């Protein structure tokens, strides 16, 4: 790629990094990342990927901006209330970095559309807050061989792992979704707004590390943190031979839409 003078200035702090340089920035600029959920996690992920100059950012979310979102979903502003989240997010990304192509999907990710949506992307970021879609993302990425970053937040805590083909997947740790309403979502139990930023920036860093080939990804590790005590813990994980999707005898060979938890608050699908 031939960067313009303005692009060299924009990405100069990346180019100055010995481990990134011009070649790494070229990989970023030609990269394609899908962000599932334009909410609490998707907001910082999309902002930092856009600032970094990721060539194509896909955004899929079927919700509209609600006033209750603004406590943590930093890509949306007060004037965006009532606007589709993917449109609101695209507008901010375009203002931040016109180099980035933003592809929007104003829909929920489902078993019917998941493989078609993710097929053109290099990396997928899970920015959702409900278990059915988290398992759907995992299964779709494992079945199609796509790397992805899992992220989850609740109250004062967050957790994340990165999947690459051959590494332990989300189902290796958590065999199946919990029963509906067994575990509360953020919109049921609450979440400290800054937690979304903490975890979202980690997920964005994982995506950039994947695109550039720099550093060690959170593969084979589950990173969790508690903001009350500001403690972080990385737990080593192993691929399970009995995993229903990536084990020796997989039983999940096609995508499934699991039952969603019921929530009375309007922001019920994304963090």
Image: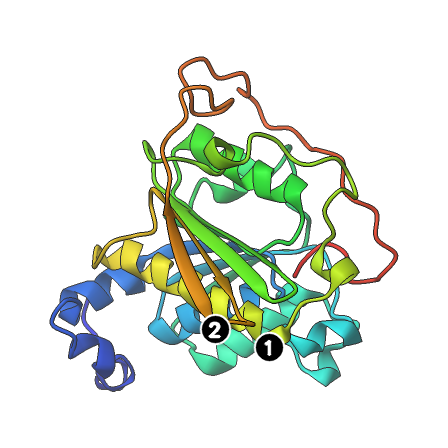
Pointer 2: residues within 10 angstroms few (<14), some, or many (20+)? many
Query: Could you tell me how far apart the alpha carbons at marks 2 and 1 are, in whole angstroms?
Result: 9 Å
Q: Residues within 10 Å of mark 1 (few under 14, many from 20)?
A: many
Residue located at (40% from left, 20% from top): 241
The residue at 30%/65% (across/down) is: 29
Label ID, residue 12: none
Residue at the disc numbered 2: 47
Give left or right: position of 43 versus 67.
left
Q: Quadrant of residue 192?
A: bottom right
The residue at the point 21 percent across, 55 percent down is 213
Nearer to the camera, 71 or 117: 71
The answer to whether 16 is drawn above or below residue 59 in the figure is below
Left or right? Give the position of 24 relative to 164. left
Residue 226 image offset from top left, x and y in percent: 52, 65
The tag earlier along the polypeptide, 2 or 1, is 2
Q: Residue furthest left?
A: 18
Foreground: 21 or 138? 138
* Residue 127 placement, left or right of 203: right
Circle 1 SS class: loop
Residue 74 has which mark? 1
Q: Quarter of the image holding residue 129?
A: bottom right
Local SS, label 2: helix
* Residue 189 pos. (x, y %): 75, 61
Residue 96 lies, with reference to residue 204, above or below; the image says below
Tell me residue 154's x, y (percent): 64, 60
Q: Residue furthest top?
A: 249
Q: Cβ–Cβ below 8 Å for labels 2 and 1?
A: yes
Q: In the drawing, does residue 165 fall left or right of residue 118?
A: left
Q: Position of residue 159 (x, y in %)?
A: 50, 55
The quarter of the picture where the C terminus appears is bottom right
161 and 80: which is toward the camera = 161
């Amino acid at each position: 790629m031939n960067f313009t003078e303005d692009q060299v200035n924009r990405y100069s702090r990346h180019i100055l990094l010995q481990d990134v340089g011009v070649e790494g920035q070229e990989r970023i600029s030609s990269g394609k990342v899908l962000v599932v959920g334009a909410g609490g996690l998707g907001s910082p992920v999309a902002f930092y990927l856009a600032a970094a100059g990721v060539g194509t950012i896909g955004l899929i979310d079927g919700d509209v901006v609600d006033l209750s979102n603004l406590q943590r979903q930093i890509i949306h502003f007060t004037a965006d209330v009532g606007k589709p989240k993917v449109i609101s997010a695209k507008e901010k990304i375009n203002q931040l970095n016109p180099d980035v192509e933003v592809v929007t999907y104003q829909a929920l990710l489902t078993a019917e559309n998941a493989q078609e949506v993710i097929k053109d992307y290099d990396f997928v970021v899970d920015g959702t807050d409900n278990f059915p879609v988290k398992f759907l993302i995992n299964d779709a990425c494992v079945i199609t061989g796509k790397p992805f970053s899992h992220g989850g937040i609740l109250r004062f805590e967050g957790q994340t792992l990165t999947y690459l083909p051959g590494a332990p997947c989300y189902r290796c740790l958590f065999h199946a979704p919990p029963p509906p309403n067994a575990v509360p979502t953020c919109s049921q139990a609450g979440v400290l707004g800054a937690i979304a930023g903490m975890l979202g920036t980690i997920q964005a860093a994982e995506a950039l590390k994947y695109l550039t080939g720099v550093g060690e990804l959170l593969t084979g590790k589950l990173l969790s943190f508690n903001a009350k005590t500001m403690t972080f813990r990385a737990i080593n994980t192993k691929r399970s031979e009995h995993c229903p999707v990536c084990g020796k005898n997989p039983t999940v060979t096609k995508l499934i839409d699991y039952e969603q938890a019921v929530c009375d608050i309007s922001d019920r699908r994304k963090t």
